[in-house]
């Protein structure tokens, strides 16, 4: 049976599972950004923590089994070589999913707290999911434009 529950984990299955978990969490975050459980717990701790554990397990396993030497990761050629391994690539993608979600949860909390209108908040969240730094910049621009006296360091 291909893709069944009893089948061994493959990089593709890891990729699909982590993407599915992240997508579901992002949908919940975009729809319910003001719900404390969603923005403070589910998308700030639980889902990123679960994805981080997957990342750590794969990277730990790869390093323990003679994976890419750390020196190689200091060059583009070394990174390209490391990412040629599907397990490393899937783990690297999971790394993005974790940090984008943590940033998204902060954006949701901050936007709700500052009263940023839902179209801008939603645009920032969707773009953070799809293009991380672009969504973050949209939120920072909305924050600065709509709340010029707010502190960037505020909770």
Image (cartoon, rainbow, N blue to C red):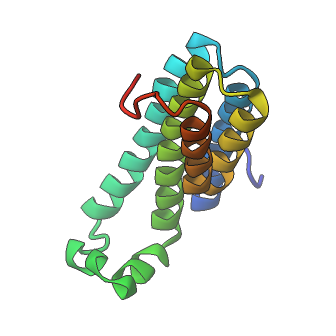
Q: Is residue 47 visible?
A: no
Residue at x-position 57% and y-position 12%: 37
Determine whether 39 is above or below 151 in the image. Answer: above
- The image quadrant that residue 22 belongs to is top right
Describe residue 129's horizontal placement relative to residue 143 as left or right: right
Q: Position of residue 135 (x, y in %)?
A: 62, 49
- The image quadrant that residue 140 belongs to is top right
Between 45 and 4, the one lying in front of the other is 45
Residue at x-position 56% and y-position 33%: 107
Q: Position of residue 98 (x, y in %)?
A: 49, 43
Describe residue 6's horizontal placement relative to residue 1 as left or right: left
Determine whether 105 is above or below 16 in the image. Answer: above
Q: Is residue 105 visible?
A: yes
Q: Position of residue 84 (x, y in %)?
A: 49, 78
Residue sitting at the far bottom: 77
Residue sitting at the far left: 71
């Amino acid at each position: 049976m291909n893709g069944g529950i009893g089948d061994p984990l493959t990089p593709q299955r890891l990729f699909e599972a982590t993407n599915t978990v992240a997508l579901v969490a992002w949908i919940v975050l975009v729809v319910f950004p003001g719900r404390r459980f969603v923005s403070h717990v589910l998308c700030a701790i639980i889902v990123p923590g679960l994805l981080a554990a997957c990342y750590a397990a794969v990277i730990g396993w790869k390093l323990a089994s003679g994976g890419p030497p750390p020196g190689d990761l200091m060059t583009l050629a070394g990174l390209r070589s490391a990412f040629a391994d599907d397990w490393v690539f899937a783990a690297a993608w999971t790394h993005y999913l974790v940090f984008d979600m943590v940033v998204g949860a902060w954006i949701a909390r901050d936007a709700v707290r500052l009263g940023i209108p839902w179209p801008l908040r939603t645009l920032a969240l969707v773009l953070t999911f799809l293009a991380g730094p672009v969504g973050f910049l949209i939120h920072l621009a909305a924050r600065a434009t709509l709340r010029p006296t707010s502190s960037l360091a505020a909770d």
